[in-house]
């Protein structure tokens, strides 16, 4: 009797797969709230070696709201045209919209340290969610450069439409059931980039590139969507040892479609050195 046990187990498994069948999901469209990638920068001034600084910053972004059409895709199991009992992975194209822009208030706390020319920093901020990062760089009399990496816990609304088919045979048109979703939640994305600053006494000019890819999950399907590359151009002035003012512009480039979204920006920072 024992010799037939493996055969019996395989038969049961095969029968279970036939009974369960395969569920196919197709996301046809979505609308997602997205934001500029958060800005990260260095000391903005020459920092004496072997010292530290704590910075608290408040920023205001102002721009018009915009709906940007994007293309996305996801993978799903689909019926094979050559064999109705065989399934294969296929790519589903999805129409999407990024909702970006509007007046945003941001806040951030940075811990910065310098040893020789090398700098290290950790920052945590609020910008339509929470982001945090680690920064490594170099600070000299006239240059402030570095790179950073972290996570962006973006908070936004997602609406989507799609259809689903659960069957043990080929999905015919009448087997598909439509669905829609509307949810607001935190989604985690990788955040990274670099910055380069020119120091001119108490004044400075910064360029920063920051990027992330929105993490969009619709009905359990992870969508492949365009990344957002935000380019920050900032002029600033250190009023005294503790207070800094700045202003500039940010251009967010949406990958694949080549679209730019521009915003104005101003801010105020306080230092403890």
Image: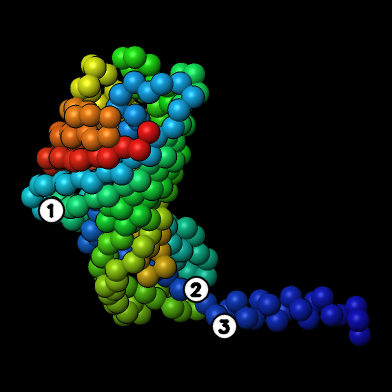
Crowding around mark 2 (Cα neighbors within 10 Å: few <14, some 14 to 19, many 20+) is some
Residue in view at x 72 percent, y 79 percent? 11
Separation (CA) of disc 1 from disc 2: 43 Å
Q: Which mark is residue 183?
A: none
Q: State the residue in front, 150 or 86.
A: 150
Mark 3 vs 1: CB contact within 8 A:
no
Q: How is the image coloured?
A: rainbow
Query: Which marked residue is nearer to the observer: mark 1 or mark 2?
Result: 1
Q: Residues within 10 Å of mark 1 (few under 14, many from 20)?
A: some
Q: Nearer the viewer, residue 140 or 154?
A: 140
Identify which residue is drawn at 29% across, 71% down: 183
Up the image or down, 132 lies above or below 167; here it is: above
Left or right of 171 in this view: 160 = left
Q: Position of residue 79 (x, y in %)?
A: 44, 66
The residue tagged 1 is 102
Q: Which residue matches tag 3?
A: 19
- Badge 3: residue crowd in 10 Å (few <14, some 14–19, many ≥20): few
Residue 214 appears in the picture as rendered:
no
Give the image quarter of residue 44.
Answer: top left
**187 displayed left or right of 58:** right
Secondary element type, mark 2: strand
Assign a secondary structure to mark 3. Answer: helix
Q: Is residue 219 visible?
A: yes
Q: Position of residue 225 (x, y in %)?
A: 32, 50
Secondary structure type for disc 1:
loop
* Residue ID for mark 2: 22
- Spatial CA distance of label 3 from label 1 is 51 Å
Instruction: Give the residue at x 36% y 62%.
Output: 186
Q: Is residue 111 above or below residue 154?
A: above
């Amino acid at each position: 009797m024992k010799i037939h046990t493996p055969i019996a187990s395989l038969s049961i498994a095969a029968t279970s797969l036939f009974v369960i069948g395969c569920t196919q999901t197709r996301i046809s469209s979505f609308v997602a709230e997205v934001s500029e990638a958060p800005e990260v920068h260095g000391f903005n001034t020459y920092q004496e070696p072997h010292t530290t600084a704590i910075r608290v910053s408040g920023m205001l972004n102002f721009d018009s709201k915009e709906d940007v059409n994007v293309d996305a895709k996801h993978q799903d199991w689909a019926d094979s045209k050559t064999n109705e009992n065989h399934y294969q992975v296929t790519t589903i194209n999805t129409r999407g919209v990024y909702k970006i822009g509007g007046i945003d208030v941001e806040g951030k706390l940075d811990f910065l340290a310098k040893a020789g020319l090398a700098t290290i920093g950790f920052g945590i901020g609020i910008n339509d969610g929470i982001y945090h990062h680690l920064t490594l760089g170099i600070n000299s009399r006239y240059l402030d450069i570095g790179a950073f990496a972290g996570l962006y816990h973006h908070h936004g609304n997602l609406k989507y439409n799609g259809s689903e088919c659960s069957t043990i045979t080929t999905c015919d048109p009448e087997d598909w059931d439509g669905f829609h979703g509307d949810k607001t939640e935190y989604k985690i994305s990788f955040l990274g980039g670099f910055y380069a600053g020119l120091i001119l006494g108490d004044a400075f000019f910064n360029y920063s590139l920051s990027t992330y890819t929105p993490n969009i999950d619709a009905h359990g399907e992870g969508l492949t969507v365009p990344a957002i590359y935000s380019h920050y151009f900032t002029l600033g002035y250190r009023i005294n040892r503790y207070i800094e003012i700045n202003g500039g512009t940010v251009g967010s480039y949406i990958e694949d479609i080549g679209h730019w979204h521009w915003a104005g920006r101003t801010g105020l920072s306080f230092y403890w050195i």
